[in-house]
Amino acid sequence: MAELRFSALKEVFNREPVRIETSSKVISKYFGEDVFNLHKMEHYLSKEAFRVVKRAVDEGKSLTWQEAEQVAIGLKAWALERGVTHFTHWFHPLTDGTAEKHDSFLEAGDGGHIVENFSGAVLVQSEPDASSFPSGGIRNTFEARGYTAWDVSSPVFIVGSTLCIPTIFVSYTGEALDYKAPLLKALSALDKAAVAVCQYFDKDVTKVIATLGVEQEYFLIDEALFYARPDLVLADRTLMGHQSSKDQQLADHYFSSIPERVMCFIQDFEYTAHKLGIPVKTRHNEVAPNQFECAPLFEEVNLAVDHNQLLMDIMKRTARKHKFRVLLHEKPFAGINGSGKHNNWSMATNTGKNLLSPGKNPKTNLQFLTFLVNVIKAVHDSNELIRASVMNESNSWRLGGHEAPPAIISVFLGSYLLSILDDLSKKVTDRKMTPAQKTELKLGIGKIPEILLDNTDRNRTSPFAFTGNRFEFRAVGSSANCSAAMIALNSAVAYQLTKFKEEVDQIIKKGRNKDEAIFQVLKKYILESENVLFEGDNYSKEWHAEAARRKLCNIAGVPDSVKCYLTEGSRKVLVGSGIFTNKELESRVEVEYEKFTKKVQIEARVLGDLAINHIVPTAIKYMTSLIENVKGLKEVFPDDEFENLAGSRKELIVTLSDHINEIRRLVHDMVEERKKANVIEDEYKKAIAYEKKVKPYLDEIREHIDKLELIVDDEMWPLPKYRELLFTR
Ligand code: ADP
Ligand code: MG
């Protein structure tokens, strides 16, 4: 067994960096080369077709089949020039990844010969037999047909020799089966609600887009070591492994120079990403050894989500070329930092204004405060929904840990803004304000510096932090499709802005002027959502106590967090605004329960297998060698000397035996609990059984294995150890 570990280590020692050639050193020369973007459309489409697509993109509309026919002609010409042979609709089912089913352009021509064809009909719509994707019971298998439809707002791209068409995925009866369809609805709801509020300040605003910049954290592990760890291969994380004597204590990995082999990998995937129009900008070593981060420039949310999904895919594929494996799991190693996917989020207008950036004068600053306070209120009111959107099995190992935001969603503002809001809530009175009072308020607001970036003391522990001109939603997991988080956040803010507009209009109707009405509602919101604001250390025990006093919701369990999608409040936001139907929402929650159960089940099976078939036999082998040794001592030494010599060895034999027995007992009990859970029909109850009855065994069993790792002969230990996984590359 141990041979695999040692041969893997030898392989790693002999690795050389795989250097890549780029077509040019100037990124802008090849940026977007593999994307059918507006620029290329202008070149390949007729004037009319180009106009139609551009309008569809701007207005968020889809194309008719006749219009699509025009586009397909140009698209095909471009694709064939680029050596493309196949096309696929590319979509985001409710699994963790993306999905594709390739078809070639081949068709039988009239004369019986084969021709290349690509019609508008297949561009805009396709019917993959996608009956095996999770649907939470929306589709019975006998009516399994779902169809995919082109999302014109996300451009078509080429991977290898395949043309990829970003699409939504819906059931035959129209229910969403993916992340993209509801995301587009949420973004459109936000657009509408935010534009309406912007009208108070600027009549030129006709469109508001949500923006997203995703910081992606990941680990890299050498391929040979990866294959020697069945837990990494099957469960994406290590289910055992004693902490390395040195890991991240010295913070000497953070921002240190990127190792050459890793650098070659990064340059390689960045090159591919840039050609695909993904604006990757930042790269650095993260805190944990072998942990890294990359971040693109922010983009419109739907595009940023597509790009992040594509980027994760590119990273995984490129890693293989470099004999690495990318671990996107939130907590691949116990005891050291996990990985997140910080979602930097804001809203921008067609007039070029970032709505979460303070402006140059009192008017723009009142607009800034309006959006800021509404976001805070949305996070306060939809607290449970926002947590539900980031909670899942893999992220549950990270959330609430010592390096990640806890399961309490609070908002960090920084002392400066906090004092501004405090001031506002004190100065605004319910009585009609005098002109002098109003002037004073506006003057105060006018002083907010345009660039708050340097003033916001960074609070790294907050799950939802204001960072000067955007919010950073940090609780999102590194392997997640950001759509879930973005659907929740954008829907909550859209819902909130709509309510705000109604309340302000009500007050205006009663004869107050606009600014005063806005001030009053803002004051009310500040007071109502005060308890979600927290400036301190979110990792501390005190915060948990304080949050309980504030009656903030704190659910660390996954099924119960997910269940919050179905509260009255969440339904109001999601169903009330038309993002989901009740049926869609309920089925989505079923899918989440099922995913949770299955993931714990896989981990439990893998751990059981490793424990019984790898670790216990190794421990027995080592124990046997000790017994032989003790027997030998007995033969060689007289009784009194023997006792002296063999005492500690005998103790070791007993310790080994205890751990072996405990592991066997625990694995047996865990299997029994699984059997009981497996017959539960209700998906929520089953998930709860897996969480409460099965999941705890994972840590208990591991504890014994990790202790064994410390005492068993290193020569015999079958799996690469943490120090090897984390420091060899
Ligand atoms: P940090 O210092 O938090 O590690 P990074 O530079 O790694 O920050 O990433 C910050 C991310 O925030 C980038 O993706 C950046 O484009 C994004 N960002 C900046 N401004 C906005 C904005 N207005 N809306 C959304 N994202 C933004
Ligand atoms: Mg960063």
Image: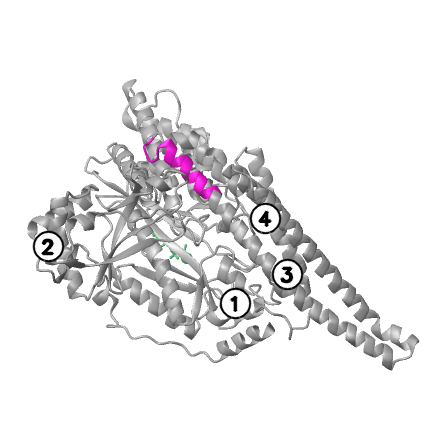
What amino acid does circle 2 point to?
A: Leu
Q: Residues within 10 Å of mark 1 (few under 14, many from 20)?
A: some
SS class, disc 3: helix
Question: Image point 32% across, 36% down: which residue?
Answer: 366
Q: CA distance from mark 4 to mark 2?
A: 56 Å
Earlier in the chain: of badge 2 and badge 3, it is 2
For the residues bearing labels 2 and 1, Cβ distance under 8 angstroms: no
Residue 251 image point, x, y percent:
53, 64
What amino acid does circle 3 point to?
A: Ile
Q: Residue 695 — which label? A: 4
Earlier in the chain: of badge 1 and badge 4, it is 1
Residue 716 image point, x, y percent:
64, 73
Q: CA distance from mark 1 to mark 4?
A: 34 Å
Question: Image point 19% across, 41% down: which residue?
Answer: 59
* Majority SS type along the magenta span: helix
The image quadrant of residue 196 is: top left
Q: Quadrant of the N terminus?
A: bottom right
Q: Quick one: which residue is furthest to the top in this view?
A: 510
Earlier in the chain: of badge 2 and badge 1, it is 2
Between disc 3 and disc 1, the foreground one is 3
Between disc 2 and disc 1, the foreground one is 2
| Residue that badge 1 annotates | 252
Which of the two residues, 271 or 663, is positioned nearer the viewer here?
663
Q: CA distance from mark 2 to mark 3?
A: 63 Å
For the residues bearing labels 2 and 3, Cβ distance under 8 angstroms: no
Q: Is residue 429 left or right of residue 91?
A: right
| Residue that badge 3 annotates | 612
Residue 184 image point, x, y percent:
29, 42
User: Is residue 355 among the parts visible in the rendering?
Assistant: no
**Which residues, given as a range, are shown in magenta?**
577-593
Instruction: Reply above or below: 562 against 598.
Output: above
